[in-house]
Structures are given as structure tokens and as C-alpha cells.
Image: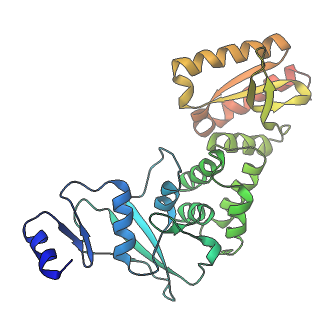
Amino acid sequence: MTRAHLRHLLDAKQWRRLCHGVLVSHRDLLAEEAVWWAAVLAAGPEAYLAGMAAARAGGLRGSWRRRQIVDVLRPGTSSVPRLLKRLPLEMPAVKVHRTTRLPIEDRQVGRPPRTSMARSLLDAAVWALSDEDAVSILAAGCQQRLVLPAEVRAVAARFPHCRRHALIVATLDLAELGATSPAEIGFLELCRRHRLPEPQLQVKRRDASGRTRYLDAYFAEFQVHVEIDGAQHMDVRAWASDMLRQNDLWIDGDRVVRIPAFLILTNPDEVVRQITAALRAAGWR
């Protein structure tokens, strides 16, 4: 394409310019993938989509609060991130981070180029708006089988002084035990803090029809099963399935305690009271 042809397309408003060197060949709003591409191209050569944007590009799903920023990593010596300016209103802010530690195993050839899932989740947790968001991001990546906790821990070992390092490692430790949601992680921490027996998490069970089911938390010695109900349990079909599964457990002799996930954060004392009472009724002293 000649420069004259390109200029004609821009003047005729068939194409438009996002920023220096980045053009869009249509007049519609940018799709999410196009925003990622624009961020990487605007950041210059050797740029990689990073953090939450890279994790989402790799398949991460979630409804937590998202930073309205697209993070990009570039190899370099400067440690001070900079915001790209003069972007159109439809583009979120693009923050370019320089790093001297971006080995080949942290780079993934994708569309657009992005960091590996393990590096993306670590960076997303470091840059998250809150500790709760950081835990949610790590738990979601492990729960959705996008990465193993050990893979993220290996990346975290290279950044021992990063923000929230202790929280990140503790979250990954709990994820390896089977706690793959913030509520399950919080529940396990409650048990440890109050010196209750430590439950097994995500225990496989076969129901009466032979289907494999997973128990959120199970105190096997006392046959106490704790079901941690998130928002998905409000769906009518999920609710009916939960009731049938609960009936099977009761018929087999287990005690079933159901805890709303939000209660673990808002009223942990009541959660501890009920779990303690159930364990004592089952013989724990």
C-alpha cells in the first residue's frame, strides 16, 4: 500500500488513527481483542500483554473488580511504569512496565503476544486493587485449571520482594490443598486460626446414580460435610442438584452444614460457632 492510498483512507474516514503507528481499518468500536492488540503495538517492539489482560486473553474468567488499565511488559532497565497518552476515549489507559526479568519461559506466542499464564496471574495479583482481588485472581486461575499452583510459585520465587509476596505464596499453598475459591481459602484459614480440625477440600464422592461429586470441605473423621454456597447456588437447577446431593449425604449418615460464601468474610464468628457445634455433636472434643 502506498502512503498516498493510506492517506486517502484516513482522509475519507474509512480508516482511523489510534496513536502514532497504530491504525484501525474500520469505524466501529474496538472489540476487547483489538484493544489488547492496540496496547501491545502502541507500546513498541518487544512488548507483551501482561497482568489481567494477558490472563483474560489466555482464558481466565471472573467477575471481580477489574483495573481499567491494560498492562504491557517490555524488556528494559527502567523500573518506573509509564502511561501511554493521546489514546482515544474508547481505549482504556495503557501502562507500560519495564522489566529486566522476562525470560523465555515467561513469554508466550499468542495473538497478541502475551506473558505466560503463570507470569500473568502473578503480575495481576501484584497489581490488583486489593488483597481480596489478588486472592480471587490466583484462586480463579487454579480453579479453572489454567495453571498449577506450583507454576505460579516458581515465578513468584524469582520476585521475592514483590508486593503481596507472602499473601501470594500462602494462597498458592492453600490452592494446592484444594482451596480453589476465596471462600474456601477463607474457610480453611478460619479452621486453622481457631484450632479446629483441618478438613479435606474438594473430596470426590459418587452419588446414588454413580456420578462423581465434589464435597467443598469434609471432616472425614467426624463425617461432617461443609458446603460453601456461592452465587451460582442461587440458580434453580444448581439449587435442586445441591438438595439431591445433600439428601444422599444425609441418607449415608453425614452431617451437612451449609455456609453462604459471603458469611465467611462478613460474619466469621458465626461460621466458627456452627462448625464447632457440628463437630462437637459428631464427637470432637
Q: Residue at x 76, y 15 (%)?
A: 209
Residue sticking out furthest to the left: 12
Q: Residue at x 48, y 57 (%)?
A: 57
* Residue toward you, 107 or 275: 107
* Residue toward you, 244 or 127: 244
Q: Residue at x 9, y 73 (%)?
A: 8
Count of numbered labels shown in the rendering: 0
What is the quadrant of the C terminus in the image? top right
Location of residue 19 with respect to 199 vertically, above or below: below
Q: Position of residue 222 (x, y in %)?
A: 89, 25
* Colour scheme of the rendered structure: rainbow
Image quadrant where residue 121 sits = bottom right
Along the horizontal axis of the image, is 13 left or right of 42? left
What is the quadrant of the N terminus in the image? bottom left
Along the horizontal axis of the image, is 38 left or right of 178? left
Say whether residue 128 is visible: no
Location of residue 127 with respect to 251 vertically, above or below: below
Q: Position of residue 272 (x, y in %)?
A: 73, 33
Along the horizontal axis of the image, is 212 left or right of 162? right
